Image (tube, rainbow, N blue to C red):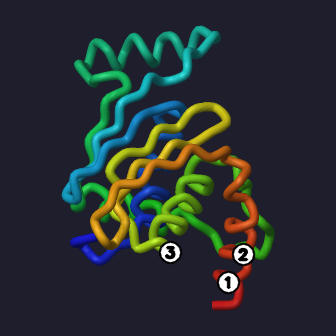
Amino acid sequence: MQSGISYDQHLRVIGQSLEAKRINLFELKSDGRQYLVRGAPEKDANLLGRWRDWRERLKGEPLGSVSYGMAEIERLDMEGRSKRSKSDRLPDFYSLPNSLRTVGCYLDSKDAELLELHKSPLSVTLLYQNKDGHPNMEERSVASFYNLFVTLHGKRNKE
């Protein structure tokens, strides 16, 4: 990536932002300079949630379409770092930031360039170019990344 931040950091930051917006199912496209995410927030059954959705629509904030440039990712990363605490316990793999971070590490390990990522309830579809420029597409269950997540967490704790 051009900014020197790897996919694991980019996707974790995007995952934190999407989680806050209640967007768990989405399509992400990357052009190397920015990420465009399209997805709909989960419908809130309670009155407070419906009021929040209505207020966002009145403000003109587009529900479900978010763009992340490199400067925005770096700003969100700095905000996220200030909120994180060091813990020896294993974080929740199924939280969106952690599962996306693991997918990012997977892409980094392949030295791949992410083109698209589609997140469904139980799977992730990746479209990427390998280091030779050949396109690849993989559809994998989210759970298939769990062992990589545990390995990476163990390495981070040793640092």
The residue beneath circle 2 is 151
User: Is residue 22 something one can see in this rendering?
Assistant: no
User: Could you tell me which secondary element the residue under label 2 belongs to?
Assistant: helix
Residue 133 is tagged as: none
Which image quadrant for residue 158? bottom right
**Disc 2 marks which amino acid?**
Thr
**Disc 3 marks which amino acid?**
Ser
Q: Quadrant of the N terminus?
A: bottom left
Q: Is 65 placed left or right of 13 in the picture?
A: left
Residue at left offset 73%, top offset 54%? 92
Q: Nearer the viewer, mark 3 or mark 2?
A: 3
Task: Using the numbered discs, state the Cα–Cα distance from disc 3 to disc 1 in whole angstroms.
Answer: 14 Å
- Classify 120 as above or below 43: below
User: Is residue 80 something one can see in this rendering?
Assistant: yes
- Classify 93 as above or below 46: below
Q: Mark 2 Cα within 10 Å, few/some/many (few <14, many 20+)?
A: few
The picture places residue 120, in percent across and down from the top left corner, at 57, 32
Dot 3 or dot 2, earlier in sequence: 3
The residue beneath circle 1 is 155
- Classify 31 as above or below 3: above
Residue in front for this viewpoint, 55 or 33: 33
Q: Is 67 placed left or right of 118 in the picture?
A: left
Q: Is 7 placed left or right of 103 in the picture?
A: left
The picture places residue 11, in percent across and down from the top left corner, at 45, 56
Which image quadrant for residue 153? bottom right
Q: Quadrant of the C terminus?
A: bottom right
Residue at left offset 35%, top offset 37%? 37
Discs 2, 1 touching: Cβ within 8 Å: yes
- Classify 68 as above or below 32: above
Q: Mark 1 Cα within 10 Å, few/some/many (few <14, many 20+)?
A: few
Residue in front for this viewpoint, 78 or 91: 91
Residue 109 is tagged as: 3
